[in-house]
Amino acid sequence: MGIREEFEAWWMSGAYGTRKYDRFSEIGLTEDDALEIWEASRAALVIELPSRFAEKYQDYFDDVDGGCFNEGRYIKDLTVAIEAAGLKVKQ
């Protein structure tokens, strides 16, 4: 689903059968205004992900030459970074 489709689904939804556009039109906000705000909020969302090459994601074993990437630890840190931005992670 693209940004426009996401927005339209949100715009047409509402509690108790009241569409959001009915409520926003009371304050003079048009659908185009709301879409512009929606797009700006999406564009402003930037999440800095940890580097996969950081030492903390390497595990070392006697029988393995070099380090092994610890994917579980990395995914945990990715989840923390995403949730810190106020988003939910579904696993």
Image: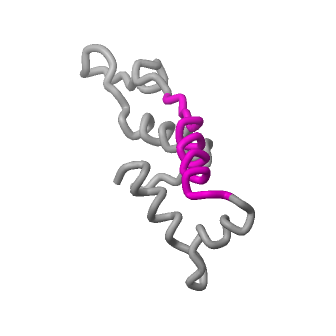
Please identify the quarter of the rendering in which residue 43 is found: top right
The magenta-colored residue range is 29-49
Please report the residue visible at 37 percent of the width from the left and 49 percent of the height from the top.
2
Determine whether, in the image, residue 8 is placed left or right of residue 61. right
Does 47 appear in magenta? Answer: yes
Residue 72 position within the rendered picture, expressed as x and y whole percent measured from the top left: 39, 40
Determine whether, in the image, residue 30 is placed left or right of residue 9. right
Please report the residue visible at 37 percent of the width from the left and 32 percent of the height from the top.
70
Please identify the quarter of the rendering in which residue 45 is found: top right
Quadrant location, the C terminus: bottom left
Residue 83 position within the rendered picture, expressed as x and y whole percent measured from the top left: 57, 47
Does 57 appear in magenta? Answer: no
Indicate the colouring scheme.
one colour
Q: Nearer the viewer, residue 66 or 49?
A: 49
Above or below for 61 versus 32: above
Please report the residue visible at 67 percent of the width from the left and 71 percent of the height from the top.
23
Q: Main secondary structure of the magenta part?
A: helix
Above or below for 36 versus 64: below
Determine whether, in the image, residue 5 is placed left or right of residue 41. left
Quadrant location, the N terminus: bottom left
Residue 41 position within the rendered picture, expressed as x and y whole percent measured from the top left: 59, 43
Q: Nearer the viewer, residue 52 or 64?
A: 52
Q: Residue furthest right?
A: 27
Please report the residue visible at 45 percent of the width from the left and 65 percent of the height from the top.
9
Q: Residue furthest bottom?
A: 16
Residue 52 position within the rendered picture, expressed as x and y whole percent measured from the top left: 40, 24
Above or below for 25 versus 35: below
Q: Nearer the viewer, residue 75 or 73?
A: 75
Q: How many marks?
A: 0
